[in-house]
Image: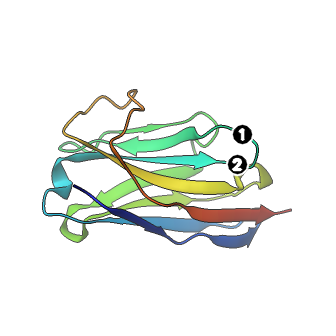
């Protein structure tokens, strides 16, 4: 069982940067592929970014590519989402997710989910 807790959301201006963090419980964080998803009001949840266990390969949604960086610190059981040049359309609840061992980053089926952190970008 893994629990995930996101933090770092808030209200920012368009063009600002924000770093989200997600801390995972447990001692096997390094063997989990981690993902970030978001859900805007009235819309379905969508994939943002993912980082695999092991080689830390990454994948990004086209909508955020070039503005967002996902990274992980296995010593801190933490995955980060650095978001730059934020736009109003980035406004959403951002969720952290985890999946054991599977490195396939096009697989959006995750086992564990956090409660989410709100990001609001005002223009």
The answer to whether mark 1 and mark 2 are in CB contact below 8 A is yes
Name the residue rendered at 23%, 33% in the picture: 102
Residue corresponding to mark 2: 40
Q: How is the image coloured?
A: rainbow
Q: Secondary structure at mark 2?
A: loop
Q: Position of residue 8 (x, y in %)?
A: 53, 72
Side of 23 relative to 21 (left or right): left
All told, the count of numbered labels is 2
Q: Secondary structure at mark 1?
A: loop
Looking at the image, which residue is at 58% across and 48% down? 38
Q: Return the residue nearer the eye: 121 or 5.
A: 5
Q: Quadrant of residue 79?
A: bottom left
Residue 91 lies, with reference to residue 48, above or below; the image says below
Left or right: where 80 falls relative to 20: left
Give left or right: position of 2 versus 63: left
Residue beneath the point at 60% across and 40% down: 45
Label 1 sits on residue? 43
Q: How far from the left and from the top, in percent, is residue 119? A: 65, 63
Instruction: Measuring from the top left, give residue 31's x and y in whole percent.
Output: 16, 48
Quarter of the figure with the C terminus: bottom right
Describe residue 14's horizontal placement relative to residue 58 as left or right: right
Look at the picture and state if 83 lies above or below 61.
Answer: below
Residue 118, horizontal then vertical, whole percent: 63, 64
Q: Residues within 10 Å of mark 1 (few under 14, many from 20)?
A: few
Neighbourhood count class around disc 2 (C-alpha, 10 Å): few under 14, some 14–19, many 20 upward: some
Farthest residue to the front: give it. 1
């Amino acid at each position: 069982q893994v629990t995930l807790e996101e933090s770092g959301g808030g209200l920012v201006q368009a063009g600002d940067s924000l770093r989200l963090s997600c801390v995972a419980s447990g001692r096997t964080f390094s063997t989990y592929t981690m993902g970030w998803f978001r859900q805007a009001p009235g819309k379905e949840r969508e994939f943002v970014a993912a980082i695999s266990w092991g080689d830390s390969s990454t994948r990004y949604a086209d909508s955020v590519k070039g503005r967002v960086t996902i990274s992980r610190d296995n010593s801190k059981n933490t995955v980060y989402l650095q978001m730059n040049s934020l736009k109003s359309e980035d406004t959403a609840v951002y969720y952290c997710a985890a999946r054991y061992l599977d490195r396939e980053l096009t697989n959006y089926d995750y086992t564990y989910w956090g409660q989410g952190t709100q990001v609001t970008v005002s223009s």
